[in-house]
Image: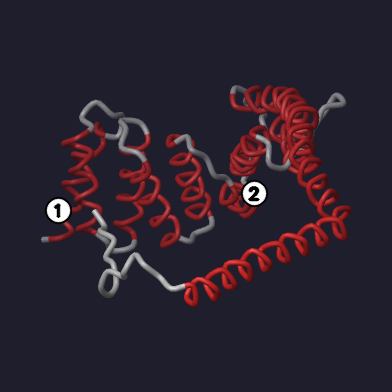
Amino acid sequence: MATYKKRGSKKSISTSKESEVPQESTTAEVFETLDTTASKTEEWVVKYQNIILTTIGVIAVGVLGYLGYNNFIVKPKAQEAISELNQAQYYFELAVNSVNSDSLYRRALNGGEGKYGFLDIIENYKGTPASKLATYSAGMAYLNIKDYENAIVYLDQFTSEDVLLGALSKGAIGDAFAQLGQLEEAYDYYVEASKINNNRYSTPKYLYKAAMIGTELGKNSQALSFLKRIEKEFPEAQEARLVEVQIAKIETLMQ
């Protein structure tokens, strides 16, 4: 605890009248100064009250405007975007389950029957959850119609707190680079995708792809470690059925 310390010796209680006069004078000066300061403050407020009130009004209007914008513009716009996304996503799902899918993927991208496609949603509903999902779906649609450059552009723009979607988007970028023959980039994205979230679906999937590309790049020791990790940690994964043969091949190459 802080302790207040007095300075000097204790003064005598008795004081002379001579000493009282300057003390009273000093006190009067202090109060006069305070009165003057208060008076100047009041004058300043009177002089600038319109500016003060205007500033307060602007702040209040800004706060109310934000609340109104959020409730009456942002939320309805987000709901409208979801409605548009549903139709585009419907075409995308049809394409996934169709033999002749290119035209359906293009319709999902560009819209149809008076509804927006993914590209329209991205352009017209920026910042909404629907726009983010449309960015991911557009990238996947481009990947499926073999437009790998655009697939990379849109998938690279996609961000999500959903770890599985994050892994799938990075892995899909790896697929696009692999198709373009850019194996170093493909390898890096597969490795990144495998690290985003440790799960029995995306992790073994991208570890296996990284291993396959790694062998082509001469990264045999890394590829072998990826395959053995699948074998040990994900024995029930589909990729686990393939690793034994691949491990044998790599070990033969490394002898």
The number of discs equals 2
Is 142 in front, or is 16? Answer: 16
Of all residues, the one furthest to the left in this rendering is 255
Is 65 in front, or is 252? Answer: 65
Q: Residue at x 25, y 73 (%)?
A: 9
The percent position of residue 20, horizontal first and vertical second, equals 50, 71
The disc, 1 or 2, on the residue closer to the chain's N-terminal end is: 2
Q: Where 58 sits versus 84, above or below?
A: below
Neighbours of disc 2 within 10 Å: few (<14), some (14-19), many (20+): some
Tell me which amino acid carries mark 1: Glu
Q: Where 144 sits versus 200, above or below?
A: below
Tell me which amino acid carries mark 2: Asp
Q: Residue at x 81, y 62 (%)?
A: 44
Find residue 188 and report its image quarter. bottom left
Residue that carries the numbered disc 2 in the rendered image: 147
Residue 251 numbered mark, or none: 1
Q: CA distance from mark 1 to mark 2?
A: 36 Å
Q: Which secondary structure lies at badge 1?
A: helix
Residue 216 numbered mark, or none: none
The percent position of residue 170, horizontal first and vertical second, equals 47, 47
Q: Is there a contact, CB below 8 Å, between mark 1 and mark 2?
A: no
Report if residue 226 is visible in the image: yes
Quadrant of the rendering where the C terminus is positioned: bottom left
Q: Where 200 sits versus 18, above or below?
A: above
Q: Which secondary structure lies at badge 2?
A: loop
